[in-house]
Amino acid sequence: MNLDFYSFLPVAAQEKCASLIGDNNVQIKVVRQRKTKHGDFRVQRGKPVTITLNAMENPYRFLLTFLHEWAHYVVFSNYRKRQKPHGKTWQNTFQKLVAPFLTADFFPEPMLKPLQKHMQKPKATFSADASLMLALRQFDPPNIKKCIFELEQGTLFRVSDGRIFYKGTKRRTRFVCTCTQTKRKYLFPPFVEVNEV
């Protein structure tokens, strides 16, 4: 296991996570930030099961991501028959794993209500839950970036690869944004962080 793993967790949760992991033959790797995911769970023939987690400065986001991926491992271990990745079995497993952590000992007060609500029917990603994302953001390190939902319609913004877009209207849960160079339209989730131009 990557020894750095525990240093990314809230201090109060380290012992509890260590007892969850126990002597399970799982490789846990902390990797540099990826744009498309916070963590993943992989099974490859002839290799140990691997969980990779992005290095994060927000320990509560890191803990939730670990528990999300650990739930995939528990489902894989207990049900050899193929299950839907975020179906009922995974949801029930994730709920059971998170339940002992749903106290002020592990999460700050502002996060508890949104997290308890989220856990009633957990989604495949936290990004789909606006109130939980807003609560988590309070504990992210300060930065000058803004989330798409915070920008006024028509605002220009730059994404990490340098392209510039202007923000359009909301379509269900995402915003339609147009690339200024190509005029192509893209759908952006509300919590993508960008630089206002």
Image (cartoon, rainbow, N blue to C red):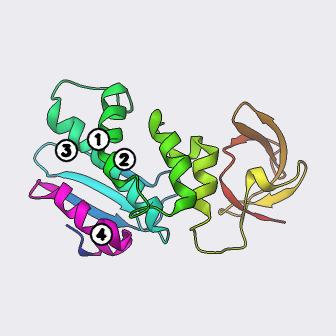
**Quadrant of residue 103 within the rendered picture:** bottom left
Give the labeled residue for mark 2. Answer: 68
Spatial separation of the CA atoms under disc 1 and disc 3: 14 Å
Query: Which of these two is toward me, 90 or 109?
Result: 109
Give the labeled residue for mark 4. Answer: 5
Q: Does residue 95 lie above or below 7 as drawn?
A: above
Which amino acid does the dot numbered 4 rest on?
Phe
Identify the magenta region: 4-26
Residue 61: image location, x then y, percent: 47, 60
Label placed on residue 44: 3
Give the labeled residue for mark 1. Answer: 72
Q: Quadrant of the C terminus?
A: bottom right
Quick one: SS at disc 3? loop
Question: Local crowd at mark 1 within 10 Å, few (<14), some, or many (≥20)?
Answer: many
User: Which residue is drawn at the image coordinates 34% and 41% (left, top)?
Assistant: 94
Question: Local crowd at mark 3 within 10 Å, few (<14), some, or many (≥20)?
Answer: few
> Does 26 sit left or right of 33 as displayed?
left
Which amino acid does the dot numbered 2 rest on?
His
Verify CB contact (< 8 Å) between mark 2 and mark 1. Answer: yes
Farthest residue in the right direction?
154
Spatial separation of the CA atoms under disc 2 and disc 4: 15 Å
Spatial separation of the CA atoms under disc 3 and disc 4: 22 Å
Camera-side mark, 1 or 3: 1
Residue 145: image location, x then y, percent: 71, 67
> Does 124 sit left or right of 44 as displayed?
right
Spatial separation of the CA atoms under disc 2 and disc 1: 7 Å
Q: Quadrant of the N terminus?
A: bottom left
Quick one: SS at disc 4? helix
Quick one: SS at disc 1? helix
